[in-house]
Amino acid sequence: MKFADIGLSDELLRAVTEAGYDEPTPIQAGAIPSVLMMRDMIGIAQTGTGKTASFVLPMIDILAHGRARALMPRSLILEPTRELAAQVAENFEKYGKYHKLSMALLIGGVQMGDQVKALEKGVDVLIATPGRLMDLFERGKILLTGCNLLVIDEADRMLDMGFIPDIENICTKLPANRQTLLFSATMPPPIKKLADKFLSNPKTIEVARPASTNENITQFLVKTSERGKRETLRGLLEEEDIGTAIIFCNRKTTVRELAKSLQRHRYHAGEIHGDMDQSSRIAELERFKKGDINILVASDVAARGLDVKGVSHVFNFDAPWHPDDYVHRIGRTGRAGAKGRAFTLVSPSDDEAIDNIQKLTGTKIDVLARADKGEKPGETSDNAGDADERPARGKRGARSGKGKAEGGDRPRKVDAAKDKPARRDDRRKAAPRRERDDLDGPDDGWNGPVPDFLSVGFNG
């Protein structure tokens, strides 16, 4: 099947062709005709399947006829995070360049005044995170009575982040007679309840079993000790043919420390996590996309929706606490038909988490057979800090210093006082807590430049 066979306009087909696409993915082939027929729809698809275009493309053609009015957007797309919202906006810019549609992006970290000005001009497409949308609504800066098309994207992530009450509240303020599209990688009971309440006789398009992993991704478990993780990771980075890689950690503090460790070892690494302000996060993502850095250390704020072409590898420095997060993390590679490789570093304490992941995905993950480069008797890893005397690494991880035979990595003395067994109280693990992207609000303080698409229509 070709894009020309599913009912899109000539202008839209031209933009799709110029973007380098000819055949729709399964979710696009199933969803686009139903959306064009104005049906409510539930789309269940794993990450990296082209889900965004499956609603962006038909929306552009639907909205091509009609006129926007001040403060009354004609359509609304809800996204859980700023990064996802910005990526959807980029898709509208790319595919809608031959349509004269206006768009506004409502996210935290951008001055509210600029967003209000965009709304006052009238917009055809409003892309928003729930927090900023509700803030502007309560201030009387936006009316939703003219919104006839609603998209709830990444619904399971909305659930994880506690946004479902906000979604329900927003739905009650929209016209009852509207078209609603709901997309989710998984369909837990609360999402099913939400769909039953707010969608009318929806068509369900499911292109993969919920929580299944991409067949293009080769997955491995790598056994190591908790103290030897950094050295094991560096060994993998040396052994693998790394193009670009994302390394996921469970805690924001681990992200910061690991990124600094890799930089000390001469890797071109950056970081992104929820404690960074929006301008810093955007800047770091741009560095990664442009190739200024080829390794991005990230928390789960980047696990869903981050679409960077050519990510060859994903590494789970920490086994994720929640099995759903595993599916979304490794889904950053193996996108658009490309092959990818995913490695999860596991210590003995991770057995339960790995069992839960394998039960959810229905797959047995192979254990990578490799020489153990972790701790040896009489050595300590640099998991708590890195020695400056370690051999320097050239660009992309190549060694530029002396080899091991000439005095490379050398054992360091063990500090007996520091290596005593921890007290029982110290060994207790903190309760796992999912990181939220809770920077979505009016007071984030980013006063950087406002993207052009906030208030400017598409250039025809």
Image: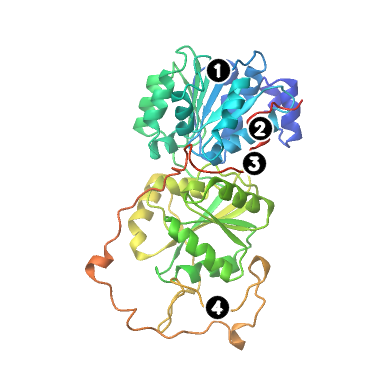
Q: Please say if 175 is above or below 340.
A: above
Amino acid found under the numbered disc labelled 3: Pro
Marks 1/4 in contact by CB < 8 Å: the verdict is: no
Residue bearing the label numbered 1:
72
Residue bearing the label numbered 4:
388
| First-in-chain label (1 vs 3) | 1
Q: Position of residue 265 (x, y in %)?
A: 58, 71
Amino acid found under the numbered disc labelled 4: Asp
Compute the Cα span from label 2 to label 1.
Answer: 18 Å
Can you say which quadrant of the picture contains the C terminus? top right
* Residue depicted at x 55% and y 50%: 217
| First-in-chain label (4 vs 3) | 4
SS for tag 2? helix
Residue bearing the label numbered 2:
453
SS for tag 1? loop
Q: Residues within 10 Å of mark 4 (few under 14, many from 20)?
A: few
Compute the Cα span from label 2 to label 4.
Answer: 45 Å
Front tag of 4 and 3: 3
Which one is in front, 407 or 192?
407
Marks 2/1 in contact by CB < 8 Å: the verdict is: no
Residue bearing the label numbered 3:
449
Compute the Cα span from label 1 to label 3.
Answer: 25 Å
* Residue depicted at x 55% and y 45%: 278
SS for tag 3? loop
Amino acid found under the numbered disc labelled 1: Met
Q: Position of residue 29 (x, y in %)?
A: 61, 27
| First-in-chain label (1 vs 4) | 1
| First-in-chain label (2 vs 1) | 1
